[in-house]
């Protein structure tokens, strides 16, 4: 359960603003903004979604800083009255909508702060997902760093050893890596973010025509700053959240409504049907163990694209500066 996950982390005092009031746009305003967002997505070549705890509240998993969030209630000496185990939780309409938007080519990548495994359960392909804070359904070898999907949530959080050898032999390898021991994949506060996932998240966020945040107050860094990486290149930021965020003034568009409501309206305007969750597409329901490692090849492939983009931007920026200098010279000569 998410409160148990929070209790499993080491003590951390700087949890940010807790329990800020939620704001709701009127239905008419939401409709107008969702139409604007759908058009923005349709006209963009590179769209990246950034998902936080608010994406999973409709699955029964409490958020952290909301009025009834785990940390908000903890400060009052209370616990959430509603809760569900991560094993029982199913992907929401929003998780399934994001998967469909990727499959239809409207979205290129998802950057997630969530550890609940619901993107995984939705059947989303690993190459479209950066998991910056880990995944409660993933075991990782502390030596070779390969990741494997568990049928149930791992017993610990904080990258603790699980007492069994690397599972690579179970997915067709001749033997496990020598001396490798499996550990849980969920980060604690002192841990560095996973390098490959962070690299992919940074590059996609910078390349994006539009970064769209869903259900996050953007208080945890560096995750909360990634959606801003495209702004200096002329990209746009869209924030979908019920509580205010520290980056609201930088957003091209702010939508205050439930995430399921927003994505349902956007998908309808784009002509994308949202599929139902199916256990057949959920790798945690598979009897055979499968791998979840993000291949280095994906990072290298995107890195090439990213470097070409940087060259093009630098050249364009240089030409802009030259043109500005020429205009100034003309004005002086006149």
Image: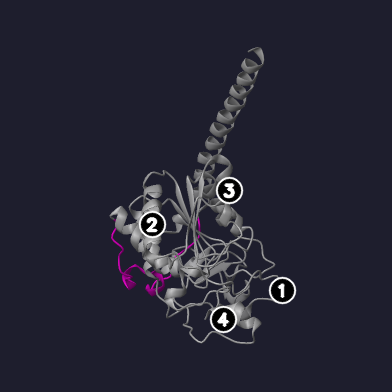
Q: Name which residue lies at 49% across and 69% down.
A: 54
Q: Nearer the viewer, mark 3 or mark 2?
A: 2
Q: Name which residue lies at 59% across and 77% down.
A: 162
Point out residue 283 in the picture as x, y percentages from the top left corner. Answer: 39, 69
Q: CA distance from mark 1 to mark 3?
A: 27 Å
Task: Name the residue carrying label 1.
Answer: 13
Task: Name the residue carrying label 2.
Answer: 34
Q: Using residue 26 as the reference point, say whether residue 222 is left or right of it.
A: right
Question: Dot 4: few (<14), some (14–19), or many (≥20) neighbours within 10 Å?
Answer: many
Which SS does the magenta portion mostly show?
loop
Q: Say whether disc 2 or disc 4 marks the residue closer to the N-terminus.
A: 4
Local SS, label 2: helix
Tell whether label 3 touches label 4 (CB within 8 Å): no
Identify the residue at the far top of this view.
333
In this rendering, does residue 155 appear at all?
A: no
Residue 62's label in the rendered image is: none
Question: Dot 1: few (<14), some (14–19), or many (≥20) neighbours within 10 Å?
Answer: few
Q: CA distance from mark 4 to mark 3?
A: 32 Å
Question: Dot 2: few (<14), some (14–19), or many (≥20) neighbours within 10 Å?
Answer: many
Q: Nearer the viewer, mark 2 or mark 1?
A: 2
Q: CA distance from mark 3 to mark 2?
A: 23 Å
Q: Quadrant of residue 244?
A: bottom right
Residue 3's label in the rendered image is: 4
Q: Say whether disc 1 or disc 3 marks the residue closer to the N-terminus.
A: 1
Q: Nearer the viewer, mark 4 or mark 1?
A: 1
Q: Say whether disc 2 or disc 1 marks the residue closer to the N-terminus.
A: 1
Tell whether label 1 touches label 4 (CB within 8 Å): no
Task: Name the residue carrying label 3.
Answer: 229
Q: Using residue 142 as the reference point, say whether residue 148 is left or right of it.
A: left
Local SS, label 4: helix
């Amino acid at each position: 359960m998410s409160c148990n996950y929070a209790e499993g982390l080491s003590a951390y005092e700087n949890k940010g603003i807790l329990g800020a009031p939620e704001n709701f746009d009127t239905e008419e305003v939401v409709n107008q903004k969702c139409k604007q967002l759908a058009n923005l997505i349709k006209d963009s070549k590179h769209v990246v979604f950034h998902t936080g705890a608010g994406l999973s509240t409709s699955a029964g998993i409490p958020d952290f800083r909301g009025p009834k969030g785990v940390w908000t209630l903890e400060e009052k000496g209370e616990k959430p009255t509603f809760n569900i185990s991560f094993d029982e939780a199913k992907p929401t309409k929003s998780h399934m909508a994001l998967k469909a938007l990727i499959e239809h080519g409207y979205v290129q990548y998802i950057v997630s702060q969530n550890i609940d495994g619901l993107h995984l359960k939705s059947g989303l392909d690993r190459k479209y997902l950066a998991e910056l804070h880990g995944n409660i359904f993933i075991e990782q070898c502390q030596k070779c760093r390969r990741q494997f999907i568990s049928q149930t949530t791992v017993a610990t959080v904080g990258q603790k050893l699980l007492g069994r050898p690397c599972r690579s032999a179970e997915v067709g390898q001749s033997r496990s890596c020598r001396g490798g021991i499996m550990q849980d994949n969920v980060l604690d506060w002192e841990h560095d973010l996973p390098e490959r996932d962070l690299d992919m998240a940074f590059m996609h966020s910078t390349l994006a025509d539009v970064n769209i945040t869903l259900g996050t107050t953007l208080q945890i860094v560096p995750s909360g700053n990634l959606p801003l990486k495209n702004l200096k290149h002329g990209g746009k930021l869209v924030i979908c959240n019920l509580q205010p965020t520290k980056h609201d003034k930088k957003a091209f568009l702010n939508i205050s409504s439930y995430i399921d409501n927003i994505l349902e309206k956007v998908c309808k305007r784009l002509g994308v049907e949202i599929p139902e969750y199916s256990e057949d597409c959920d790798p945690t329901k598979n009897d055979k163990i499968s791998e979840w490692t993000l291949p280095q090849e994906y990072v290298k492939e995107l890195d090439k694209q990213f470097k070409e983009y940087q060259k093009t931007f630098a050249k364009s920026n240089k030409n802009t500066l030259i043109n500005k200098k020429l205009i100034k010279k003309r004005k002086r000569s006149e």
